[in-house]
Amino acid sequence: MTLKFGLYGELQTPRDKPHAELYHEIMRQMEHADSVGFDVYSIIEHHFFQEFSTSANPLAMICAVAQRTQRIRFRVALHTLPLANPMRLAGEIAAADIICNGRLEAGLGRGHAWLFERSGVELAESRGRFDEALEIVLRAWTEDRFSYEGKYYRFKDLSVVPKPLQKPYPPLFAGGTSLSTYEMAGTRGWGMFLPPLLPLAAMQPSIDAYLAAAKKAGQKPNIVYIRPVYLGDDPRQIEKEVKPALLNFLAFNASPTKGLPPKEELNAKGYAFYASGALESLTKLTYEDVLAKEIGFIGTPEQVICQIRRLREQVPVTELAIVANFGGLEHWKVLKTQELFAKMVMAAFR
């Protein structure tokens, strides 16, 4: 099975870095990814937490970079459906697909638990809103006119324009931590993101649920495995260059947990993962832990090639999406890793 290679960006911004500076660096990195042969660039959608992400409008960035690139595809990972107006979002994604000349892919998810209070939406409504919004978005792309009567959304004789360039709509993906999400994605034939920073063993039950659901539904699985990557020639020099940013990446991903509801509420409202302490435990990991648990693929190109080969023996990964920009890593280091990865690692699998 051919392995695709992508990049995944969270737009993490340290407190002392101007937002505009990071945005322009990321856009340059996306252009570079196109020139060296990466297949796809994924950007998350996230609000309110600077260190976790400043990616408030990924479609705008994607549309801008699409004008400067030739072949690379783009993906939002993920649109938070319960917090969006699905009638409007369907048209916005379709318009972006046209502007990108059919190079857009769409991730659709329930969203992080810490987003809801800040967005003025009850956490308990996330599943119901997601289910209704998903039906609306899919119908908006495939029907000229339709009406809807749900608990959260109601309208009559709606026509959403424009329609996507790709028919019936762009490739769809899901992501998350609940088994129900993996089962839904497998049943529908969607691609599935495996989140960064969780060890493979912790994700195995979710992977199994996704593969079983896809097999039962007669769908072809499409697993996107995300890992932070940094490359170099000498282990001691690599550690010197990347260790501060890698530890920042762990801390930045755990930083929004201070804004979570109580554990009892999280468990009751379908967000048990956020009550588990798994994210908080990231801050206790050492640099050596990250390497030993293969939470990050850090090392020489030859070492990373071996890690990828071992991974593919355990999981039928369709795409490896590397995180090259994380934790405030300097622009030149990001470009260095992208260049080395394309020239040495991707070449070994093609």
Image (cartoon, grey):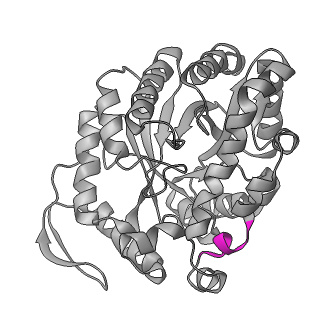
Within the magenta stretch, is there residue 223? no
Q: Is residue 299 left or right of residue 88?
A: right
Q: Quadrant of the C terminus?
A: top right
Residue 308 image position (x, y, % from top left): 77, 32
For image coordinates 34% across by 37% down, the residue present is: 61
Residue 268 image position (x, y, % from top left): 60, 86
For image coordinates 53% across by 43% down, the residue present is: 12
The residue positioned farthest toward the front in the image shown: 16
Residue 343 image position (x, y, % from top left): 64, 13
Q: Is residue 287 left or right of residue 317?
A: right
Query: Which of these two is toward me, 105 or 167?
Result: 105
Q: Quadrant of residue 332?
A: top right
Up-down relation of residue 161 to residue 145 (above or below):
above
Up-down relation of residue 5 to residue 96 (above or below):
above
Query: Which of these two is toward me, 209 or 38?
Result: 38
Q: Is residue 289 visible?
A: yes
Range of magenta residues: 271-277
Query: Which of these two is toward me, 204 or 226?
Result: 226
Count of marks overlaid on the render: 0
For image coordinates 70% across by 20% down, the residue present is: 345
Q: Quadrant of residue 165?
A: top left
Up-down relation of residue 256 to residue 167 (above or below):
below
Q: Is residue 92 left or right of residue 195?
A: left
